[in-house]
Amino acid sequence: MSCAIMGMGIVTPEGSSFDVLAEKELDLAKTADVQMLEQFHTKRELRRTSQYSRLALLGANLALRDAGMSVESFDSGRLGVIVATGYGPARTTFDFLDSIHDFGAKLASPLAFSTSVHNIAASIISLKLGIAGPCLSINQFETSFASALVSARCWLDEGRVDAVLVGAVDEYDSTLCDAIAAVDGEAIESSFPHSSPAEGSMFMLLTRDEVGKRGMLNKVLIQRRTASDPIKSAFPAGQALEVARAIALKQNVAVCCNDASGLESVISINGSCA
Amino acid sequence: MKCRISVTGMGILCAAGQGVSAVMDTLYSGARLAAPPKRISCELDVVYPVYEVQNLSAAAYSEGSGIIDNACSSEDSLSVRMLMQVVQEALVQAQLTPKDLVNKRVGVCIGTTTGASLNFADDYFAHKKHGWKSMSQVSSWLHSNPALAVSKYLGLSGPCQTVVNACSSGTDAIGLGMSWLENDVCDIVLAGGVDELSLVSYNGFIRLGVYDPEPCRPFDAGRKGLNLGEGAAMLVLEKRKDAEARGIALQAECAGYGTSADAYHLTAPAPEGDGVKRAIESALEQAEITCDDVDFINVHGTATPDNDRVESRVLTDMFPDTLVSATKGFTGHTLGAAGAIEAVFVIQALLDQKLPASVGFGESEDGFTMCPVSRDISIVARYGLSESLAFGGNNSVLIFSKEL
């Protein structure tokens, strides 16, 4: 069954307007401005919320607004959240390691620890938006986003939820970037390179409607890799930005991506029916 | 449910042992295996106990020794090595070889926390002094994503998902596996969980003030928190009609899965347990049964004051007369693996018609009417329920049924 794409939100270091998607190459290796989040939440509500979680929360809010909906449009227990990430919350993880290194185990920061868990972004979306339905986080590098879409479709098909906010988020961190580059630099020449850390988020609101305001999600496949060469996406989490571009430009495309473990993911989008 | 789903194979390893039979022997013997950590060094005044896996069998994953021909590489994390051991055990029981999986749509869904985290502490600390020169842990992290590793080593083609839902990850991985089969996304699913002890989670939970310096005491009046553990568990899930066509023994039926979010607090469960109740109701609805049909419950029972209080409140309201078993006194809290490990305990309890004592529990807190079983008991049970509560307010529930 196809899913209707009712709304979409993007956050990039180049801006959050769909216009930025017209650019072929976006510079995602820097910090994105998420001040726009204050249109949705007070500064007090955002206290102690990390950049990683803010990226996801802003993307989710923008997707709802683009759909012309709010959480109140749904039974909150029947609205799901799925967050895919390539690398997870790097900065808060390193903050916690820094606190152990700099101050010792006895003074390591419990706040940094609690904001470094991989489901922090999905939990923040659920908490700040009051979403009480199923909440899922996925972390498997380049196939994360496609994998999130597989489970989103299943939840909709089996009637577990009426709608799902599904998205991808990653944050840029120069330390992680250097670490991954160093591993790939040491690897033998034929090794499959890993994605570079990048920053941003992309969220979609999916429903079982027959027509989507932003088009339809037709097919998602995860299978053994058929191409020997790397097909990399802009986000470490997979094809989220390429899917966003297809939706914004009203294209019908199958977006591919593959990874070092030998998997490839294919996401078919019909943006022209919107 | 659109189709009936059966468990045809199980594998498990944790501090209580390696293999279903050995682990259940430990549970039924009441042995408690908490000890100071051997692989983690943390400069604290108190040595907090852990439930560490001992002597991980080399035979299960070395080249040519088992049904899985691809040996694990030196870059594989302990998590991946533990996973491949339980995959092998589960496939043997399901009478499946990797060749049998070729040309089938085989899904892999694995829950974890540390198995996917950027917890490369030693490399990171070295980097702060000398730059990125020591890279073995970073390389291992990039190489060892749990679901991707299982799919790769078995050469599988199908949906693949590493679920990072904190402490409900293992339960959610099995629930998602059920969903994939129900929606005909694949033919077979390997669903489970894995987690290894790590300095980050050990130090982190101690600093959150929820770690008992003594062996943990789920639901006991004197409980002071959790102890961490490590391990892995795996289920082979198949559509019942396919498993019956193969003539394979069915271990249990996956009857229901429910999941919900509290939307209340990042680190504390909602005090009235509304989210847990909704997850239970959702699982009961899918299983098409009522609370009265559930014969026993494997609780999350981390032994933190908040968790056990909320679970006690919910179960007193919904299941006042149902037997309750708390098993983390045998395994520690294995985080992302816990839901999968406890799914095996529920299924094996249905097969054995027996519940293990809840070690660590002695006396209930004032005002608690719910007490976990304090000695091994024989049961007559058709339905067993397993609960997982997680950081961030996630609540997930599985219901298994004895195959009739």
Image: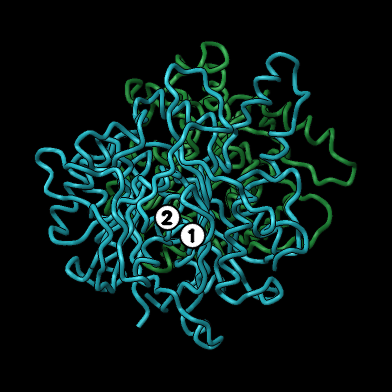
Chain colours: A green, B cyan
Q: What is the quadrant of the C terminus of chain B in the image?
A: bottom left
Verify CB contact (< 8 Å) between mark 2 and mark 1.
Answer: yes
In the image, what residue occupies the spot 63% across and 59% down? A267
Is residue A87 toward the left or the right of residue B30 in the image?
Answer: right
Cα separation between marks 2 and 1: 6 Å
- Name the amino acid, label 2: Thr
Is residue B395 toward the left or the right of residue A200 in the image?
Answer: left
Numbered mark located on residue B208 in the image? none
- Name the amino acid, label 1: Ala
Q: Are marks 2 and 1 on the same chain?
A: yes
B344 up-or-down from B94: above or below: above
B295 up-or-down from A124: above or below: below
Q: Which residue is mark 1?
A: B22
Q: Position of residue A55 (x, y in %)?
A: 50, 33
Q: Which residue is mark 2?
A: B26
Label 1 chain ID: B
Q: Position of residue B51 (x, y in %)?
A: 46, 41
User: Dot 2, how many residues are within 10 Å of its Cα: few (below 14), some (14-19), or many (20+)?
Assistant: some
Residue B385 in sight from this viewpoint = yes
In the image, what residue occupies the spot 71% across and 13% down? B129
- Numbered disc 2: secondary structure: helix
